Amino acid sequence: MRSNSRYNLKETKAAYWFNAPLIITAIVFILIPVAGTLVTSFSRDVTFLPSKFLGLENYTRMLGDIHFWQSARFTLFFVLVSICLELFFGMIFALVLNETLPARGLFRVAILIPWAIPIAISGRIWQLIYNYEYGLFNFFVQFFGISDKPISWLGSSFGAFVSVVIADVWKTTPFMAIIILAGLSTIPGDIYKQAMIDGTNFIQRFFNITLPLLRPVIVVALLFRTVDAIRIFDLVYVLTGGGPGGSTNSLSLYAYNYYVTGDFGYGSAVSVAVSIFAALLAAAYIKFGKFKEAIK
Amino acid sequence: MLSKTDNRLNYFKWLLLAVSVFLLLLVSPNCSSSQKQFTIWIGGSPEEINFWETIVKEFEDEHHYHLQLVRQPTYSDQRRQALVVSLEARQPNPDIFLMDVIWIDQFVKSGWLEPLDNFAKKENFLTGQFFRKTIEQADSYNDNLYALPVFIDVALLYYRSDLLKHFGYQNPPATWQQLLDMSRRIQKEERKTDRSFNGFVWQGAQYEGLVCTFLEFAASMGGGIMQDDSININTPANVRALQFMQNLIQKYGISPENTYTEMKEEEVRRTFQRGNALFERNWTYAWQLHQSDNSEVKGKTGIELLPHAPGDSSVSALGGWHIGISKYSDMKDEAWQFVKFVTSFKIQKEMLMRIGWNPGRRDVYEDEEVIQKMPRVKLLKEAFDHTIARPTLPYYPQVTEVIQRYINNCLAGKESPGKALQTIAEELKQIEKLYEE
């Protein structure tokens, strides 16, 4: 165990000085804004009305707000579906790239390209691909005669949801793949040799060796991705604008729209709700993912 | 003699000094100009911004003020967000900015706009030369003037003059019934050769444009959204209007199925421009595009005021951008000079002739040269006398969201007009309760 007694007073003081820039930055840029949002969420802060303290009124309004719950439903479904797909594809990519292939380095770099493209730009790219009149998908649809009329990919709630998920999976699978790949390279090869001598097949080795040993890495990757995905804003903002009919209106976008229109109090309450959802999910991962054990 | 490290240290010191001086110069305010400077925020397409740059230059040459133009994004939501943030923070910049007609009410009630009456009175500036309805519906609140129109917009009925003539119609439809009869007959004939031909295309997707079209159908059939400063939407006239809109798609089939999924301005325009529609409801911008060389309907297009029910008159939703002065500006007098400049006859005419935007001043539409070069302005002038405002409420963004959602549902056939309007009325009552003092 570490103890402070190992350091004398002078050293402790010096440590504070060295850390001061970081602490001040954290207070100014993280703590104060977060506290500000919290305070705002308890008040009526509407540009065209006098401000007043509301207590929990913004939150009770939120509980009865069907559009808020529609956004929450979309956001949670989105997190669930996209992360499962990203894990699945990321795992496959990682396993393939972990084998000795010709030009493996090239593949490893190539797979990172979607991850390197800013989200707003990839949203724009996908918007062009889904475009009703000159999009790539509708070109294929008509080229192969799947339908005689172009399909409005972003026009229906279901289509828009799937489109957002596809764009996000395309973009973020590389992140999963790279983290899992790093995990794979830490598994000693001897274990596999041993298992092969025991006559196991690939499936058995995957479920009995790879997956258990990868669990810590997977939990960390999932945690990152979940907290990230629940705040999804830029992709939907660019790709669908939250439409059609608010069906892809993520929670962050929902909060943002209240900021734009001048209701800062309610917008802040929705933002706080997003943070609470993220914290709950993170806590669930830590509890059920046996995180502490995993870190050891 | 200096040692090598000393030398290096010395060199490093000088470099550091040079870098800091450079940075200081970079962040320090521009001291070279002694003139006072004020700021205008303008967004939009590159073409739009180019135009504004020349306007600003002309103004500077004439008045010897220094006016800084700050470029905003193209999208109006982003422009609004930037304005809301700086005005809420009581920043002295921007001094002047443009507002979409539907923001003005929020800006006024938030106390962000300087009333223009005092300036106008001092200089005997008359608002009579602007369209009266525009000033009343968009720029005034409680008899105070808060903004002036820079360019305004209306919707028109575009029709295929060749087809109407071919089927023996002398005039475009004046009533909705006539539009329906012509559409049904001509669509039936045209579909024999062109399966994707439609009688009437209009904006029905779930977005702001739907509120405009609904308002036009409703108000031209004796309905409307507002009555005496409060919302009154669940009325028999509105039910009839919405039923008519639904019927156009679901019963008569003269408006295509994708009206309620996709049809926004550009989708409507392209459908008509491809030659796939007899009638089109669109804003004035479509005219020039329909007359372009790659247009299928070049020279075959006519324009008319939107139809109405017998006994009512034609109306169009009012669109456009207005200029106002920030309450927090520290150079309001100079800002007023610019507002006056932008809304002057000379600049407004230049704007119409150069980039085809419709001025908010009547006198431009009476100018000989303008009439000669753009004969359509006569009809536009008439249309601007028949405008109707969308609800002027500071919480309009929440209101429009609800209206769009349920009207769109109804067009899709998922809900009856009566039920849709009843739900809208109920939800709007909730919103009213939240945001009315």
Image (tube, coloured by chain):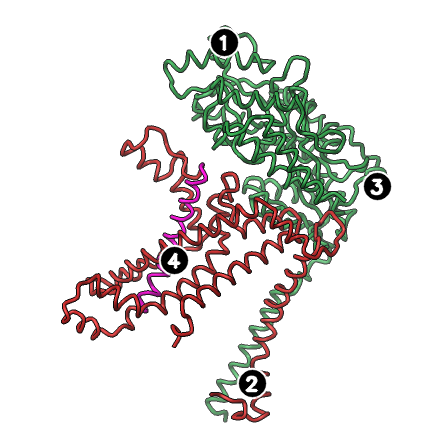
The amino acid type of the residue labelled 3 equals Asn
Badge 4: how crowded within 10 Å, few (<14), some, or many (20+)?
some
Residue stretch rendered in magenta on the structure? A155-183
Disc 1 vs disc 2: which is toward the camera? 2
Q: Chain of mark 1?
A: B
Q: Chain of mark 4?
A: A
Q: Secondary structure at mark 1?
A: helix
Disc 4 vs disc 1: which is toward the camera? 4
Magenta stretch prevailing secondary structure: helix
Q: Chain of mark 2?
A: A
Front residue of B260/A3: it is A3
Q: How far separated are the C-alphas under marks 1 and 3? A: 54 Å
Q: Do badges 1 and 2 share one subunit?
A: no
The residue that label 4 is drawn on is A115
Question: In percent of the image, x 51 and y 89: which residue is there?
Answer: A3
User: Looking at the picture, does residue A44 appear above or below residue B143?
Assistant: below
The amino acid type of the residue labelled 4 equals Trp
Chain A painted colour: red
The residue that label 1 is drawn on is B165
